[in-house]
Image (cartoon, rainbow, N blue to C red):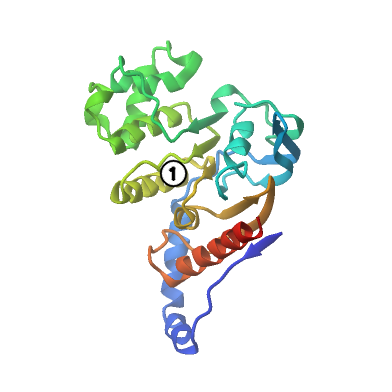
Amino acid sequence: MQTVLRTPHSETELASRASFAPAARLVREERQERQVQTSGLPLSVRGLRKSFGDNEVLRGIDLHIPAGQFVAIVGKSGCGKSTLLRLIAGLEKIDAGSISFGDAKVQPEDVRVMFQEPRLLPWARVLSNVEVGLGRDRSSSDAPARAEKALAEVGLTDKRDQWPSVLSGGQKQRVALARALVSRPRVLAFDEPLGALDALTRISMQRLLQRVWRDQGFTAILVTHDVAEAVALADRVLVIDEGRIAHDVTVNLARPRERGSAELAGLEGSILSYLLSAEDRT
């Protein structure tokens, strides 16, 4: 079931907003012009099932994600959201069903994952850690230049020769993001990458994720426990419950989104209500 959620407004508020409609339309059009043409891959999931022993985690997932869309996946712990992401990324074996990326022949560098832990090599400097993301191209002559460019995209050029041990938590995650971006993936999966960060660093990283997604046009799939994060970043929010997609919510709000706005609060509240009601049913 796909739902478009909007929050109600008073007649006075609607009339006030109407006076700003032409300017708002121009701002939206300007934002759309700044967004590059998508390089992302479409994703189709059909009848996907996955079990671990006697525990069936995913029970027939059907899903289509258009190229370049930003999708967030939420749900209670153990619902299967991280398992779905790992199957999409090829990190787990499918028991039944299929995953396809349109008609494209997918290369290893086309799909990348950013995890909750930075997973940096402690014996390698920052630039070398980013080069790891190039995989088989790591030994190419342009590898350092590509890694430098990825570091610049996350604002860490000045940390290229540092050891991971001297970086803050937010800086380590930026290096991990640069490592994921360096191969120019067409699908980038995020497995709760911001969960361990403090509130301000987390907001800064959310803005960075949104900017690189906008600039590079990859298809983004974010697994998160944070519903506010999901509605702030995504085009769609999928709610997984008991191994199935129980709710598919379209976030029909212009970017960049204003934190604390009535629209975001309404969306967050609707999704949280659904999650809590699902919890009560179990």
Q: Amino acid at mark 1?
A: Asp
Image quadrant where residue 77 sits:
top right
- Relative to 222, 157 lies left or right: left
Closer-to-camera residue (272/184): 272
Closer-to-camera residue (180/122): 122
- Secondary structure, mark 1, is helix
x, y (%) of residue 196?
A: 37, 41
Q: How many marks?
A: 1
- Relative to 42, 219 lies left or right: left
Q: Does 282 sit above or below residue 59?
A: below
Most distant residue in the bottom direction: 12
| Screen quadrant of the N terminus | bottom right
Residue beneath the point at 58% across and 22% down = 108
- Relative to 69, 103 lies left or right: right
Residue beneath the point at 44% across and 84% down = 13
x, y (%) of residue 230?
A: 49, 53
Residue beneath the point at 53% across and 37% down = 189
Image quadrant where residue 23 sits:
bottom left
Residue beneath the point at 41% across and 78% down = 20
x, y (%) of residue 194?
A: 40, 42
Q: Please give the residue where the numbered disc 1 appears in the rendered image.
A: 215
| Screen quadrant of the C terminus | bottom right
Q: Does 22 sit above or below residue 216?
A: below
Q: Residues within 10 Å of mark 1 (few under 14, many from 20)?
A: some
x, y (%) of residue 266?
A: 50, 69
Closer-to-camera residue (46/19): 46
